[in-house]
């Protein structure tokens, strides 16, 4: 992703902490295309990033900037993948890592953090409870807080997905992008990238409709969008097999809603059972073992097609954000 260093926030190349993240493949799922009459369907597979998820992009940028600032310790609340990514990049940077994670998270995520040398703190509840623990720890330890959108650098790393989508599709953006949305950094980051590319003159005026896909067990943005609540600050969600979607109080809710409104998209929620069915179908049809978060997009796309919000001949990109191998405990 550092091919785009001119639009990234690290000033000195010597401070870049990279494990080879970015430029993940844009796949053409030929069996799903044929079976469902979707001639322009693409899957961008972020599972091929270091540590197995799109989180590597944001943490590469954030830890690089922490190194540039001279930080000695980084801390993060996580539903799973972000903690492992931060632990890995902190190890590469020679910076101490503190990861606060829900106790119910699958064991592989915990093992990953400890293997990278991070201090792992387990909390009962969801990522919102972990965020409260981070706030408590910060009062006693000097550390750089890499909580979602409480610093600006993870967003900058995530926006490179938008640059890559444009580059891989010959600088013509798709009609539709579906994205699994917990904290929303990737959704907001891609939209920022599209606006930047317009200013640079790299792309035209056409921008994709953005659809944010949440878990039925934890759908704060859907509830706010549908007028069921004023905002998500008091929303009470529950755990999902898609750990990354169990974010009940997204700090960037207003920004997520703004992207959806500007793009003429909207949010929708998928239940855990349908996510697992989608994981199995995509594995059988395409030989891809994707994360439940990414699989939720496949079910969401079927709903959007049925509702005629998306047309079969449109150019559609699904973002698989992580590897299904990490979720075997949840999905088998």
Image (tube, rainbow, N blue to C red):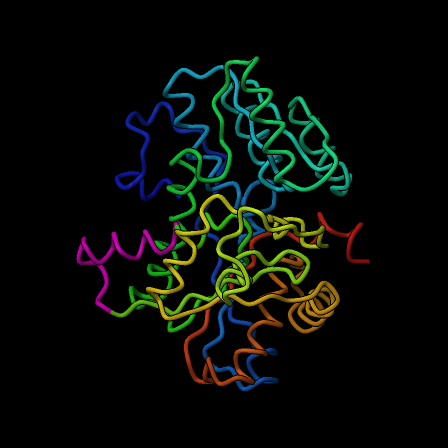
Give the mark count: 0
Q: Which of 309 and 221 is in front in this view?
A: 221
50 vs 170: above or below: above
The quarter holding residue 315 reads: bottom left
Residue 142 lies left or right of residue 195; in this view the side is right
144 vs 55: above or below: above
Residue 214 lies left or right of residue 122; in this view the side is left
**Residue plotted at (69% across, 26% down):** 120
**Which quadrant of the figure contains the C terminus?**
bottom right
- In the rendered image, residue 287, in percent from the top left (x then y), is placed at 67, 66
Tell me the chief SS of the magenta region. Answer: helix
- In the rendered image, residue 245, in percent from the top left (x then y), is placed at 61, 53
Q: Nearer the viewer, residue 17 or 277?
A: 277
- In the rendered image, residue 232, in percent from the top left (x then y), is placed at 53, 51
20 vs 215: above or below: above
Q: Please state the extent of the stretch shown in magenta in the rendering.
A: 189-205
- In the rendered image, residue 61, in percent from the top left (x then y), is placed at 42, 35
């Amino acid at each position: 992703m550092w091919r785009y260093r001119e639009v990234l926030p690290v000033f000195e190349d010597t401070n870049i902490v990279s494990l080879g993240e970015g430029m993940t493949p844009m796949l053409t799922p030929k069996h799903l295309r044929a079976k469902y009459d979707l001639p322009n369907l693409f899957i961008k597979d972020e599972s091929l990033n270091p540590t197995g998820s799109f989180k590597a992009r944001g943490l590469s940028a954030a830890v690089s900037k922490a190194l540039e600032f001279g930080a000695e310790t980084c801390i993060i609340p996580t539903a799973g993948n972000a903690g492992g990514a931060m632990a890995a990049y902190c190890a590469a940077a020679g910076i101490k890592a503190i990861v606060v994670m829900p106790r119910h998270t699958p064991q592989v995520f915990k093992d990953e953090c400890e293997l990278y040398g991070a201090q792992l703190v387990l909390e009962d509840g969801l990522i919102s409870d972990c965020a409260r623990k981070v706030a408590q720890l910060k009062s006693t330890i000097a550390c750089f807080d890499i909580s979602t959108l409480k610093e600006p650098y993870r967003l900058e790393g995530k926006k490179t997905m938008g640059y890559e989508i444009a580059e891989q599709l010959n600088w013509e953006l798709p009609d539709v992008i579906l994205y699994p949305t917990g904290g929303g950094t990737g959704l907001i980051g891609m939209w920022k990238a599209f606006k930047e590319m317009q200013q640079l003159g790299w792309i035209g005026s056409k921008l994709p409709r953005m659809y944010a896909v949440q878990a039925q067990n934890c759908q704060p943005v859907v509830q706010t969008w549908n007028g069921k609540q004023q905002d998500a600050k008091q929303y009470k969600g529950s755990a999902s097999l898609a750990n990354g979607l169990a974010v009940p109080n997204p700090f960037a809710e207003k920004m997520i809603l703004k992207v959806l409104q500007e793009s003429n998209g909207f949010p929708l929620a998928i239940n855990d059972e349908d996510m697992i069915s989608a994981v199995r179908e995509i594995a059988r049809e395409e030989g891809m073992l994707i994360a439940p978060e990414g699989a939720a997009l496949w079910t969401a796309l079927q709903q959007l097609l049925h509702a005629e919000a998306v047309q079969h001949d449109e150019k559609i990109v699904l973002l698989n954000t992580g590897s299904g191998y990490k979720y075997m405990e949840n999905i088998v």
